[in-house]
Image (cartoon, rainbow, N blue to C red):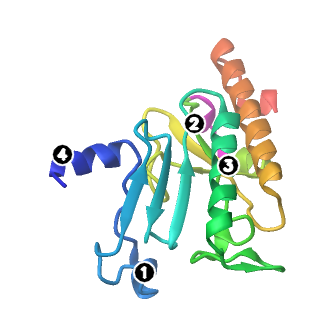
Amino acid sequence: MTAEACQQLVDDHCLFKQGDRFLESAGANRDWPENRGIYHSPDKEFMVWVGEEDALRVISMQRGADINQAFTRLKAALDQLGHELEFAFDWRLGFLTTCPTNLGTAMRASVHIKIPLLSQYAGFERLCDDLGLSIRGTHGEHSEPIDGIHDISNKHRLGVTERDIYRKLHDGVKRLIELESQLMENPGLRLGDIL
């Protein structure tokens, strides 16, 4: 693969990188980059990563506000894969994954959303936490937001259903958009005034 093709896949959020020091200590980077691959649809809205942090990661992305389409596509793919593959599963812990934070549904649903005003407030992280959401930059864990664009995702995977995750993300993002709109319409408002 050329350097340009590789960079384009990174820019499109389609290519994974070698793991961090924690994955290194777990042996997940062994023989990098051998025995790893990505498979994606022509429009790059659906992809499968093989040999990243977990043996298999299934990703469904959708531009725009229709997260239902991404969720429906993901469910159909997982149903089909479930007929062919046996996933590591424990009745108490749910799906077993390399990272303990993904135990349970193993599903991380996220949206990239531009909320530059709301994210400037000191209470922003607590607000997201109260909504059951996690925040990160658009280039993954430990990355910074660019131009006020944040990756907002479900905080919990254990003890919830996939539908719970979808609903929590939908309702939480809707609330963040409402608050951002109020701040845009009333520049003198403080976050405490509208919560």
Relative horizontal placement of residue 40, taking residue 167 as reference (left or right): left
Relative horizontal placement of residue 72, taking residue 60 as reference (left or right): right
Identify residue for label 4.
4
Tag 2 or tag 4, which sits nearer the N-term?
A: 4
Q: Secondary structure at mark 3?
A: helix
Q: Is residue 60 above or below residue 140?
A: above
Report which quarter residue 120 is drawn in.
top right
Q: Nearer the viewer's eye, disc 4 or disc 3?
A: 3
Under mark 3, the amino acid is Ala
Under mark 2, the amino acid is Gln
Report which quarter residue 156 is drawn in.
bottom right
Tag 3 or tag 2, which sits nearer the N-term?
A: 3
Task: Name which residue lies at 46% across and 79% down.
Answer: 22
Measured as percent of width and height from the top left, residue 72 is found at: 69, 42
Identify residue for label 1.
28
Tag 1 or tag 3, which sits nearer the N-term?
A: 1
Task: Name which residue lies at 36% across and 69% down.
Answer: 36
Q: CA distance from mark 2 to mark 3?
A: 38 Å
**Badge 3, how many Cα within 10 Å: few under 14, some, many 20+?**
few
Identify residue for label 3.
76
Q: Is residue 133 visible?
A: yes
Identify residue for label 2.
120
Q: Is residue 122 visible?
A: no
* Residue at the far top in the pictured view: 185
Report which quarter residue 35 is drawn in.
bottom left
Q: Secondary structure at mark 1?
A: loop
Q: Nearer the viewer's eye, disc 4 or disc 2?
A: 4
Q: Secondary structure at mark 2?
A: helix
